Image (cartoon, grey):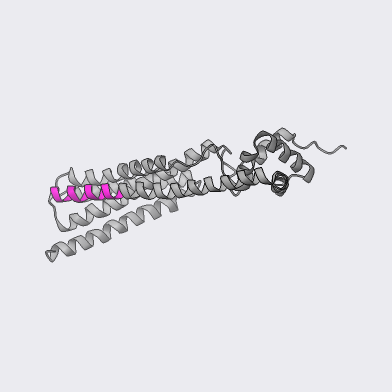
Amino acid sequence: MPPAAGPGLGETLTLVMEPTPDEAPSHEPHDAAFGVRLNWLRAAVLGANDGIVSTAGLVVGVAGATTERATLLTAGLAGLLAGSLSMAVGEYVSVSTQRDSERAALAVERRELREQPEAELDELTDLLAARGLTRDVAREAAEQLTERDALRAHARVELGIDPDSLTNPWHAAAASFLAFTAGALLPLLAMVLPPADARLWVTVLSVLAALTVTGWSSARLGAAAARPAVARVVGGGALAMGVTYAVGSLLGAVGV
C-alpha cells in the first residue's frame, strides 16, 4: 500500500505561519485579528473589574465614616478619575515599551536579512524543521516564504510578531480608561443615589452581582472553570469592602 500523501506545500506554508500550541490554545481559531480582539476583550473585563473593586472599596470605606452624600460623591469621583487615569497611563507606558521592543527586534531582523541572507534562510529552515517538517520540506517552505516576504516570515516564525499588527499604546490606554470608568461608575452611583439607610447594602449587593458577571466573563474568555474564578473575584471584592468599611467605621468613631 502506498504511503498516505502528506499535506501540500501551500497548506504547509499556512500551517507554519500560524501560532504554535504554546502561542495560542488549540481550540481557538488561529487568526491574528481574533487573538487581538480576544486580548482587548480580556483587558476590558479586567479593567472593569479593577474599577468596580477599587471604587467600591473606597466609597464603602468612606461610608463607614460618614453618610454625607457630598463627601461620598467627592471621594468616589476622585477615586474614579485617579484610578482610570492611572490605568490609562500605566497601559500606555507598558504597551509603548512592548511596541518599542517589537520594532527593535524587527530592525535587527531586517538588518540580518540584508547582511546575511543565506544564514537567515538556514535559520528559518531550522525553525520550520523544529515545528515537525522534514528537512527538505522545511527548506522549500523557507525559500518560498523568503521569496514572498522574508521579514514577515522571520518575524512570525522566529519572533512571534506580526509586523502588520503592532500594538497601539493609545488604543490600549483608551480601552483601559473606559473599562475602569465603566466599572467604577456602578459602585459610585449605587452609593450616592439610594436613600442613606439603604445605600450601603445596595452598593454591596450591586458590586457582588457585577463581580459575578466579570468573574464569569473572564473565566469564559480564558476557557477556565467559571465557579472558582467567580469565587475568587467575588471573595476578593467582598474582603476589600469589608476591610475598608471596618477601617472607615473605626476612623469615624474616633473622629478622625
- The vertical placement of 140 against 252, above or below, is above
Residue 38 or 117: which is nearer the viewer? 117
Residue 29 or 86: which is nearer the viewer? 86
| Farthest-out residue, right | 1
Expressed as whole percent of the image width and height from the top left, the position of residue 174 reads 36, 40
State the residue at coordinates (18%, 42%). Answer: 193
Observer able to see residue 20:
no
Expressed as whole percent of the image width and height from the top left, the position of residue 115 reads 67, 45
Expressed as whole percent of the image width and height from the top left, the position of residue 232 reads 40, 55
Q: Which residues are magenta?
A: 69-83
246 vs 168, left or right, is left
Question: How many discs mark residues in the rendered view?
Answer: 0
- The vertical placement of 113 against 234, above or below, is above
State the residue at coordinates (18%, 61%). Answer: 249
Observer able to see residue 32:
yes
Residue 103 or 183: which is nearer the viewer? 103
Expressed as whole percent of the image width and height from the top left, the position of residue 256 reads 14, 64
Could you tell me which quadrant the N terminus lies in? top right
| Main SS class of the magenta portion in the image | helix
- The vertical placement of 185 against 148, above or below, is below
| Farthest-out residue, bottom | 254
141 vs 223, left or right, is right
Residue 255 inside the magenta-drawn segment: no
